[in-house]
Image: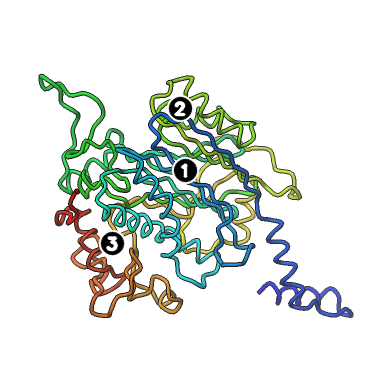
Amino acid sequence: MASREGKRRNHHNHNHENLVPLAALIRRETKAAKMEKPFVRYGQAAQSRKGEDYFLIKTDSLRVPSSSSTAFSVFAIFDGHNGKAAAVFTRENLLSHVLSALPCGLSRDEWLQALPRALVSGFVKTDKEFQSRGETSGTTATFVIVDGWTVTVACVGDSRCILDTSGGSVSNLTVDHRLEDNTEERERVTASGGEVGRLSIVGGVEIGPLRCWPGGLCLSRSIGDMDVGEFIVPVPFVKQVKLSNLGGRLIIASDGIWDALSSEVAAKTCRGLPAELAARQEVKEALRRRGLKDDTTCIVVDIIPPENSQEPLPSPPKKHNFFFRSLLFRKKSNKLSKKLSSVSIVEELFEEGSAMLAERLGSGDCSKESATGGGGIFTCAICQIDLAPSEGISVHAGSIFSTSLKPWQGPFLCTDCRDKKDAMEGKRPSGVKVI
């Protein structure tokens, strides 16, 4: 498309000159794309009390193998509890499980559109594999992918990620899955067979935050925790946003930070500092206010406009820093894109937090995926094993949440993943036993 437009302009303005070769146009556009890609700078700091916080920083991941222009960055925090095993396992396996759920041969836009569903599959597969080990440890997971100006965040638990834009607007990109604070999650847990209440001491006095019983976990979503009940689910809240060309700062941290600092205070605490010093300052301020009562880990990621970009416009008033909602599969007009990029507005591309896999894994329109060999129509949508045509069970079969879809439509699950789905929704007990 761009090459045809270039030829038309050349013919109109320079009738006596040769047309620009297609290869030259491709090189020019590739160079322009590299110039427009933001710089990513990051810093990390931590103070340990129990040794159960782990993090992941990987800046050399590739959408297309051996193609450096398809690089993206991954930042994640895993706050373990009841031991470190789940946090370590998730750090080592979650990224590969997410990537294995993405079809091959996708363009960048298609890859970003497929990413939310792949994150759901990756989280559930990681949980299923860890639980099969018979260990009772659990972990939060806040997993951030930065590809150009697009930021995709998936989370279970209460390790928060916030966005601070150049105009001073602070936005939460995650949802805290704490039973004390999240009414919807309390209702989901009780509807699935769990009991929610506080710890009772001698005399029947209730103390502390709301917990799920059995197990006494304060969180409603996590990876692991096989001894607590399958209604504590690994299905993540996912949010995808596109920053303006003024960039922004991400602060990703375990609850050691958030129990001491609000999102707004955390953003204000480190403004004006480079990423590495900013992360240290967050930890220092949290310890100053609350002391070292928990493992405290922070990653700060700065998404910075290219050095040769135009001077940023003055920051608009805070009331103009809002999320501009748009549909994931709707193409934006050039006029709208230019308008959005000229001010510090964050464009929301996707947001979904349902715990129901029938809603999160989508419809069975897998023609593209079948042809490219990843997540195909006869592949389990979670664990990615190949299925014979007679083996796959639709994720929508028997679900009251997918009445508009036919039960023979995909995506499909293997028997083990179908049992996992039913257990999470309270339809049958988990078959996993604690060793």
> Residue 228: x, y in percent?
21, 43
Left or right, residue 22 beside residue 412: right
Count neighbours of disc 2 (C-alpha within 10 A) and say few if under 14, some if 14 to 19, many if 20 or more.
some
Q: Which residue is at a point 59% across and 59% down the rendered structure image? A: 71
Q: Tag on residue 55?
A: 1
> Pointer 3: what residue?
358
Q: Earlier in the sequence, mark 2 or mark 3?
A: 2
> The disc labelled 2 sits on which kind of residue?
Leu
Label 1 – label 3 distance at C-alpha:
30 Å
Instruction: Say which element carries label 3.
Output: helix
Q: Nearer the viewer, residue 352 or 93?
A: 93
- Residue 291 falls in image quadrant: top left
Q: Residues within 10 Å of mark 3 (few under 14, many from 20)?
A: many
Residue 351 lies, in percent from the top left, at 41, 52
- Residue under the image location 51 percent in, 24 percent down: 285
Foreground of the two, 326 or 184 = 184
Q: Which residue, given by chain and number where applicable, does mark 2 sit on? A: 261
